[in-house]
Image (cartoon, rainbow, N blue to C red):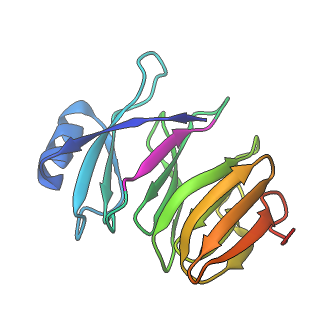
């Protein structure tokens, strides 16, 4: 998975105008967004310019290109979006009840495991929930192979399989 660089833009209005002039699309809702970004997409892929409007909750958004597809996945605040990079079409967008921290695993078929403030969630390539593991507040984590170890508030550690979501 290739992470894309994000270029901060001073205002969402400025980003919207830039995308309008360049024929691009905006991911996310600029109303209430506290940060707006232009995605730094490598030349020669045939992608349109894409911007990201996010309520970040203090977390840096993350955008990755899925291997062997024209699809991008974006974590922005409490939202997860999957977008076709060629035409900007939204494949799915999902809101979580808590901030999303990072992608822990992205599978060949586009399914994704996401670490969020209160545990883990796995989404299918169409955005359907495959499984969840809810915990208290996650204070840290580590990944070793197919296993993620979560450091939970109160000094508790829990280990889960990234494939099944089951405790190990």
Q: Is residue 2 above or below residue 11?
A: above
Asked if the magenta segment contains residue 64, the reply would be yes
Residue 9: percent from left, percent from top: 18, 44
Q: Is residue 159 above or below residue 91?
A: below
- Please tell me which residue is depicted at 65% across the width and 81% down the height of the picture: 135
- Tally of marks: 0
Quadrant assignment for the C terminus: bottom right
Residue 140: percent from left, percent from top: 56, 64
- Please tell me which residue is depicted at 59% across the width and 84% down the height of the picture: 136
| Residue at the farthest top position | 44
Given residues 157 and 17, the one toward you in this image is 157
- Please tell me which residue is depicted at 17% across the width and 38% down the height of the picture: 18
Residue 29: percent from left, percent from top: 31, 63
Residue 160: percent from left, percent from top: 79, 66
Quadrant assignment for the N terminus: top right
Q: Is residue 62 above or below residue 22?
A: below
For residue 114, what is the image quadrant? Answer: bottom right
| Residue at the farthest front position | 155
- Please tell me which residue is depicted at 76% across the width and 40% down the height of the picture: 108
Asked if the magenta segment contains residue 155, the reply would be no
Given residues 61 and 73, the one toward you in this image is 61
Q: Is residue 21 left or right of residue 45?
A: left
**Segment tinted magenta in the rendering:** 60-66
Q: Is residue 46 left or right of residue 7?
A: right
Q: Is residue 42 above or below residue 118?
A: above
């Amino acid at each position: 998975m290739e992470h894309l660089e994000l270029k901060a833009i001073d205002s969402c209005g400025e980003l919207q105008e830039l995308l309008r002039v360049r024929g691009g699309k905006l991911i996310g809702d600029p109303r209430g967004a506290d940060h707006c970004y232009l995605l730094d997409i490598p030349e020669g892929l045939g992608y349109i310019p894409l911007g990201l409007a996010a309520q970040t909750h203090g977390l840096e958004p993350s955008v990755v290109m899925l291997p062997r597809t024209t699809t991008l996945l974006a974590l922005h605040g409490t939202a997860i979006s999957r977008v076709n990079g060629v035409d900007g079409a939204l494949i799915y967008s999902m809101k979580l009840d808590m901030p999303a921290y990072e992608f822990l695993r992205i599978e060949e078929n586009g399914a994704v495991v996401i670490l969020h403030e209160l545990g883990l969630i796995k989404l299918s390539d169409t955005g359907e929930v495959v499984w969840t593991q809810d915990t208290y507040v996650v204070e840290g984590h580590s990944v070793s192979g197919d296993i993620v170890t979560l450091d939970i508030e109160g000094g508790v550690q829990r280990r889960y399989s990234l494939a099944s979501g089951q405790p190990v």
